[in-house]
Image (cartoon, coloured by chain):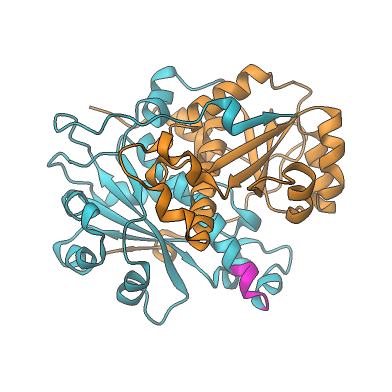
Chain colours: A orange, B cyan
Amino acid sequence: MKQALHPAALEQLFTHARTFNAWQDRPVPDALLHTLYDLLKWGPTALNSGPLRLVFVRTAEGKARLQPLLSEGNRAKTLAAPVNVIVAQDLAFHEQLPKLFPHVDARSWFADNPALAESTAFRNSSLQGGYLILAARALGLDAGPMSGFDAAAVDKEFFAGTSIRSNFLVNLGYGDTEAGVHPRNPRLAFEDACQLL
Amino acid sequence: MKQALHPAALEQLFTHARTFNAWQDRPVPDALLHTLYDLLKWGPTALNSGPLRLVFVRTAEGKARLQPLLSEGNRAKTLAAPVNVIVAQDLAFHEQLPKLFPHVDARSWFADNPALAESTAFRNSSLQGGYLILAARALGLDAGPMSGFDAAAVDKEFFAGTSIRSNFLVNLGYGDTEAGVHPRNPRLAFEDACQLL
């Protein structure tokens, strides 16, 4: 029977994890990005559609393309992070459904319904973004999402001529605990966010 | 220095976790739902906005309200699960920002921009849905998301007169491994879903 993970694991994933603005000078090897994907890809999505697409930006050339598209307040910490992940979604994800969900013709449910395709891609790529952040933390990385960037410009720069659209960004690396983090903001109490019926 | 979690923890969270259609006759205590929220609430969201709202449906009365609003294919497994979670989003989440993100007047960015409020609520409540699923697995529960329900009808039944809207559903419980699960569908290869720049 499955048990709860060790308290130290729950701390690493949730209660002690923080969003960092400064980073150790410690690289994130490409092999670890493969391991990261090979964990997060197993998280459940609607009809196994998996609309998430990821761009791992880790070279100076890649960062030079991303930098001008970031909001001012996010620029320094993003450039300093070893890896910036563009968390994106394929609005034509349904073209993969014959492979990913082969026992039903689910492709046809979306092919003529762009609004349904768009909301499904947005919901499920965001859900997979949650898997990405927690898979990174499970691998000992620090990860924090950001929405402060020019999404249309990122789409033009990185996804021109494709059905892929940016959703949000995640910085990956090893947080510099000595540089400190902001004081933690409060969260809503159970009673304010949840109902028991 | 943080390390990767033990391989058994990565299996429990990602590689061995499955979506169940049959459940053990083992209750999920309310105290565990509180513990679940007290983990997932720490996951990062834009401006600490935390737009997620949850309804834990676990009584016969609650399930009787939900049942007719489920798609036929999801009805039996959902009724059999000890807890059905309505994962919802508060479109007026920004009213909480003076408390949750007190150092900036972020409320005003959304108060006059319903489209921005809506996309922020949808993205971040979905992201938090990912935290919910993995927090449940971290606590030894099985969890699987579903979109097969009448969202407008759920909103009318459970959220009438409020700014809360349903996003998706998650069944929680202890999966019945003897009843079996569907064969696992494939996932996209790294090269098909990811770019390294």
Which portion, as a residue range, is magenta?
Answer: B112-117
Is A160 situated left or right of A111 in this image?
right
The percent position of residue B23, horizontal first and vertical second, equals: 17, 41
Asked whether B190 or A25 is in front, the reply is: B190
Reply yes or no: does residue B116 show up in magenta: yes
Is B48 situated left or right of B87 in this image?
right
Among all residues in the image, which is located at the extreme left? B25
Reply yes or no: does residue A165 show up in magenta: no
Among all residues in the image, which is located at the extreme bottom? B161
Is B42 situated left or right of B68 in this image?
right
The percent position of residue A27, horizontal first and vertical second, equals: 74, 21
Q: Residue at x 36, y 55 (%)?
A: B147
Q: Residue at x 37, y 72 (%)?
A: B152
Above or below residue B115? Residue A169 is: above
| Magenta stretch: helix, strand or loop mostly | helix
Q: Residue at x 50, y 55 (%)?
A: A117
The percent position of residue A74, horizontal first and vertical second, equals: 79, 48
Above or below residue A123? Residue A11 is: above
**The C terminus of chain B, quarter of image:** top right
